[in-house]
Image: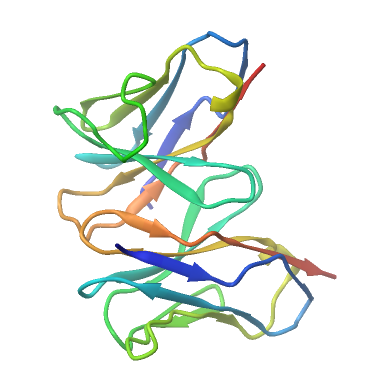
Amino acid sequence: GAVVSQHPSRVICKSGTSVKIECRSLDFQATTMFWYRQFPKQSLMLMATSNEGSKATYEQGVEKDKFLINHASLTLSTLTVTSAHPEDSSFYICSARDGGRNNQPQHFGDGTRLSIL
Amino acid sequence: GDSVTQMEGPVTLSEEAFLTINCTYTATGYPSLFWYVQYPGEGLQLLLKATKADDKGSNKGFEATYRKETTSFHLEKGSVQVSDSAVYFCALRGNEKLTFGTGTRLTIIP
């Protein structure tokens, strides 16, 4: 089945550091990828929708300058948390949609646990 | 806007017990409905789905039926196993975005 690889799986770093998370679709082309944030014992909150070759669409309340998203190819999207602070600590999950139509399934990565000291 | 309400957990059951996790939704139009499962430290895996009213999704012994009249998509399994311990998310997709419920943590005791 379709596989989405997310890297790294865990990051621990100091406050003020910028952290880049990669999301790759390994065996299909993903014109659209999604980035979610999950707080402990809570649901997934959509942060932004990333479309290949264009700017990401951010959800209300998500800071564009804080969470930089780049979707430069059909198999790779990156999320950069700039100047991360302890409140940015969370579990970040990406998903990729297999194909261009809205009814195509989304496949999820295994997530990245970000801990800012 | 779209929303999903699911049964709050945690839910603890003995092995071989019957499982029901309730899920209801609010949406415009005709959404697709999903159940996802998340094992500790991992991302989400699609468990089952239904795309139209009266469809039944099934996988690994789990079932859920798309009930338009009650706007529900309850998850059921006749005999749970320890390996079913995980967090289960109900979700709907309207136009493009997935909207998730808050998740239900399920623990199965041997």
Residue A51 rendering spot, x and y as whole percentages: 20, 35
Q: Is residue A99 visible?
A: yes
All told, the count of numbered labels is 0
Foreground of the two, B1 or A74: B1
Residue situated in front as seen by the camera: B44 or B9: B9
Residue A101's spot in the image, x, y percent? 15, 54
Query: Is residue A10 placed above or below B41 in the rendered structure?
Result: above
Which residue lies at the image location 30% right of the left edge and 28% below the top edge?
Answer: A76
Q: Is residue A34 left or right of residue B35?
A: left
Q: Dividing the picture into quarters, in which one does residue A26 lie? A: top left
Q: Position of residue B65 (x, y in %)?
A: 42, 84
Q: Residue at x 27, y 48 (%)?
A: A97
- Compared to residue A112, the image places residue B102 above or below, namely below
Q: Residue at x 18, y 28 (%)?
A: A55
Name the residue located 63 percent from the left edge and 44 percent from the top edge: A40
Residue B18, horizontal then vertical, whole percent: 69, 85
Q: Nearer the viewer, residue B82 or A88?
A: A88
Colour convention: rainbow
| Residue A28, image quadrant | top left
Is residue A29 at least partly visible in the picture? Answer: no
Position of B17 relative to B11 (above/below)? below
Residue positioned most to the front? A61
**Which quadrant, please, contains the C terminus of chain A?**
top right
B85 relative to B66, above or below? above
In the orientation shown, which residue stands out farthest toward the right?
B110
